[in-house]
Image (spheres, grey):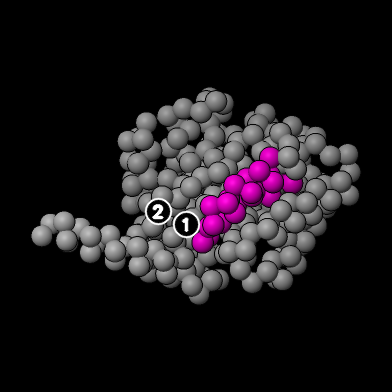
Amino acid sequence: MKSLVLLVAVFQLQLFAADSPWQRVVVVGASASAGFVLSEPFGGTNTARCKLNRYLDAAIAVPHAPVKNLANALLFMNPTAFGPLQIQAATNNHPTLVIGVDFLFWFCYGDAATDAERAARFETGLKLLDQVHCPLVVGDIPDASSTTNTGIIGAYQVPSETARTAANKRLKQWAAKHPLVTVVPLAKFMRDTKANQAVKIHNQTLPAGKTRALLQGDQLHPTPQGAAVLALGILDALTAKQPGFSASAIRWDPKQVFQLGNQTARTAN
């Protein structure tokens, strides 16, 4: 009898998964998605607690396979070489949803002699994303110029305001022609958290004076609590834009998502 009940449960889960847009979620991108802590450049316990997939898994309350994280902190070294590998690996997984909130960051930032060179590299990033034929979430390009004071990014790697503005304008144009694409306002998230301003997620607001703790001291990478909030911000934008992804499938409590995701990270290590 117990075996029959188990078989029925597995069958029902398979039926749900076959129709669920949450069935195969894949993350691509750079260090903010992969998890990064400056004191652990080669990874470690604290780094594992910052991995974005931990908190996406915790936030998605309906049955789903574990979110696969293909993001790599080394993307900054050569995005035009490493980016295609991530996209190929992602598409090979036949995803139902791809999340690349920081995938385009190093296609704008990084070493470049001119704004035109940055624009051309950014176009390469968009062409890579053209290969994703399922719902896709990408972040816009934030102002990370203050990170030069922390040593995490060199001044030569920071695009001019003109180049960054142009990249975001181009992203908006590109996304308008791709109905399955959702753009997350990553720039606003970083701007508000660095300034310790209020951050609104779904139907709740994290108050001013409490949000600076969502970013690490390097002013670029999220803390574990920040990764939880960022995951909810991603899902908020997705469910608002794409009708196939229901907001009722999400746990919207940032504290609960942080606790669940953090516990998973600790257990895994």
The one nearer the camera, 194 or 226, is 226
Q: What stretch is highlighted in magenta?
A: 82-107
Q: In which quarter of the image is residue 45?
A: top left
Does 33 appear in magenta? no
Quadrant where the C terminus lies? Answer: top left
Q: Would you say the residues marked 2 and 1 are in contact, meaning their CB atoms lie under 8 Å apart?
A: yes
Relative to residue 27, is residue 235 depicted above or below?
below
Tell me if 226 is positioned left or right of 257 in this view: right
Spatial distance from mark 2 to mark 1, Cα to Cα?
A: 6 Å
On residue 24, the disc is 1
The one nearer the camera, 246 or 165, is 246
Residue for point 51% across, 61% down: 96
Tell me residue 31's x, y (percent). 59, 39
The one nearer the camera, 190 or 55, is 55
Residue 207 seen anywhere in this rendered image of the structure? no
The amino acid on which the numbered mark 2 sits, given as a three-letter code, is Ala
Does 104 appear in magenta? yes
* First of labels 2, 1 by sequence position: 1
The amino acid on which the numbered mark 1 sits, given as a three-letter code, is Arg
Farthest left residue? 1
The one nearer the camera, 2 or 159, is 2
Tell me if 79 is positioned left or right of 240 in this view: right
Mark 2 secondary-structure assignment? loop
Relative to residue 20, is residue 219 depicted above or below?
above
Disc 1 crowd rating (10 Å Cα; few below 14, some 14-19, many 20+) is some
Tell me if 113 is positioned left or right of 82 in this view: right
Tell me residue 139's x, y (percent). 63, 55
Mark 1 secondary-structure assignment? loop
Relative to residue 265, is residue 168 depicted above or below?
below
Tell me residue 119's x, y (percent). 83, 51
On residue 65, the disc is 2
